[in-house]
Structure formats: structure tokens, C-alpha cells
Amino acid sequence: MNRQVWVFIQQENGCIAPVSLELLSKARELAGELGSRVCALLLGHGVAGLAEQVIHHGADRVLLADHAELARYRTLPYARVAAELARERRPYIFLLGATPVGRDLAPRIASALRAGLTADCTALQLGDFERGGKTYTDLLYQIRPAFGGNIIATIVNPQMHPQMATVRPGVMKMSEPDSTRSGEIEQIEPQFDERDLVLQVLEREVREPACDLPGADIIVAGGAGVGSRENFSLIRELAQALGGEVAASRAAVDAGLISHEHQVGQTGVTVRPRLYIACGISGAVQHRAGMDQSSKIVAINSDPHAPIFQIAHYKIVGDLNKVIPRMIRAYREKAK
């Protein structure tokens, strides 16, 4: 049985999406347990120079499809190439990032292969599963929040392969690249049907994101305890003073204090900054799962028994409306 672990490498303008490098690290771990290899699928035009980077991050083989029709992401050409390669070579596991591209491409591939797909996973591991008196070994446990993050579901696909999953950016730790690694680069000559090319991109407008939480070194997050949209100006002011990004808990987002793209947690973004300052966040398990790998956590809360204090390195019990202005003043004085 082919037990290879495949990773789709998402790239834009010659830059690999961080989630793809994170998935290579996880794929390396899974392949080690399976005694198998990691295969990366790299599609684009003029992207051959990225293959070595992919190998340094954990791929044993790179399937490189370099073609003018793949220069910009379009669903049908990308799905055609990826699905035909997977149908021919039958990987055991196929991972994609849960990005707009991955969420568009993965269902197309899964449908073409008649395979299952679990979206927005927050964890992956191997394990066994029993059904009908039969034991399936080394299945991919595809773990994700469900019912609004109130439960964690573990999903398996014992019969139809590849086992496919999209994984949220930031939930897997990216390993350091190893420049001594070597691997194979296989050139793929894609073949397209005219129906794959009916859609042409005439113009692209790139919208800059409101924040870059996964890439932030410093994050200041506000919860429902902030109290109002107006009070969130304190969170923004502290973040600006520290050169960080603004984040929020689900409770703050649900209360309309800030937009969803700032949400950290199981139903938001997973982050690993050097410094995470939680202001008025009680610390529900769903939120902690999205930030508990931060290097240093500072928590400010008026409730001395708030669960967030269980994982905080520095704990401040007090009114954030008084504490934050003092922090800002102290930092600015030190910075002079």
C-alpha cells in the first residue's frame, strides 16, 4: 500500500504560504510514524526555484507542475492537475491549508477522487478504529471543533483514500528548515481539457488584511470584559505602543466589539507570538487552545479566579481601564 503523505504547496508571486510549510512539518511527523515519505505538490509558473525550499522544510519528493496556465490560481486547472496526480499515485493522506485557495481546491479534488474531506482541522494524529468487527490501523484522526466550538470532533475515513483534510493556519508548528536535506524533484507535464480553461482572470484586486495575527510577534487581545467598542480603543492603543496586532476572544466578537478576522481560538486563528496580552478575557478552553503556545502570556482580569490565569506567566488582577493606561505610560517612558 502506498502510504505517502501529500501536501499541496500554496504559493503566490514566488512566496510559499506559511501554512504549507507548517503542513510539511506535520507531514514529516506523520510519515515518520507510517514509515513512509512526504510528497509535495507544487503548481504554478516559474516556481521551480521554490522546490529546494520545500525539500528543506521536509518533502522527500516534489511533484513540480510548471505551466503558464497555472500562473495564477484558478479552480479548474489546479483541480485537474492535482486530482489526476492523486488518482494515478493514490497517496494515503493529502493535506491542504484551510485558506481561501485550499477551501476552494480541496472539495474539488475530494469530489473527483470520491474521497472524504474534513475541513478546518486543528489537530492531526494517527490511530486505530474499529467498526463491524474490523480494525483499521494507522488511520488519520482529523480533529476539529464542531457545533460552534462547543465540542471537539474526531473524524476518520477508514475506506476511501486519500484521507483528505484542510488545516487551519498556525495550528501546526513550523520546523526550522534543514539546508542539508536532499530530495527528488519530478517534472510534471500537465494536460488540460479546453473546459478547464473557460474561466480567464481579467483583473485582480488584492485586499490587504486588517491584521496579520499568525505572523505577529506581539498581540494585545480584548475580551467581553472590555465592555464596549469604544473601550477597545485602549486595546488598540496598547498594541500600537508595543508595535503589535489587535486580537479578540469569541465573546468579544459575538458581542459586536470587533470584527471576526481578529478572533483567536478554536473558531478563529491560532497564534504563537512572543508576547500575548489578554485583557478582560476569562480564558475559555476554546480561546486558550488558540494562544496557549505563546512564549509569554500576560493576563489582565478583575476576577482573580479567571481561567486565563492558569496559563499566564504574568497575572494582573485589576480594572483594565486603569491598568492599560499605566502600562502604556510606563512603556513610553522606558522607550524614551
Image (spheres, rainbow, N blue to C red):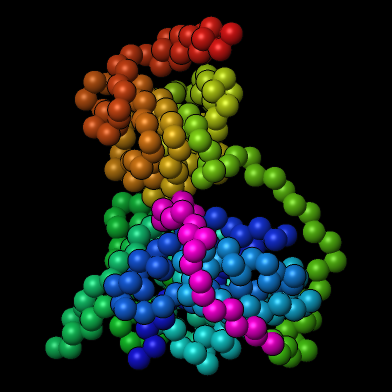
Residue in view at x 73 percent, y 84 percent:
196
What is the quadrant of residue 33 in the picture?
bottom left
From the image, give the main secondary structure of the stretch colored magenta: loop
Q: Position of residue 171 (x, y in %)?
A: 41, 53
- The reply, left or right, for residue 31 in relation to residue 114 is left
Is 298 covered by the magenta stretch? no
Residue nearest the observer in this picture, 155 or 182: 182
- The reply, left or right, for residue 306 in relation to residue 253 is left
What is the quadrant of residue 322 in the picture?
top left
Mark yes or no: residue 304 visible.
yes
What is the quadrant of residue 225 in the picture?
top left
Q: Position of residue 232 (x, y in %)?
A: 52, 24
Is 172 covered by the magenta stretch? yes
- The reply, left or right, for residue 214 in relation to residue 129 is right
Rendered-image quadrant of the N terminus = bottom left
Residues rendered magenta in the picture: 166-189
| Relative height, residue 304 to residue 22 (above, below) | above
Q: Position of residue 69 (x, y in %)?
A: 77, 77
Residue nearest the observer in this picture, 174 or 229: 174
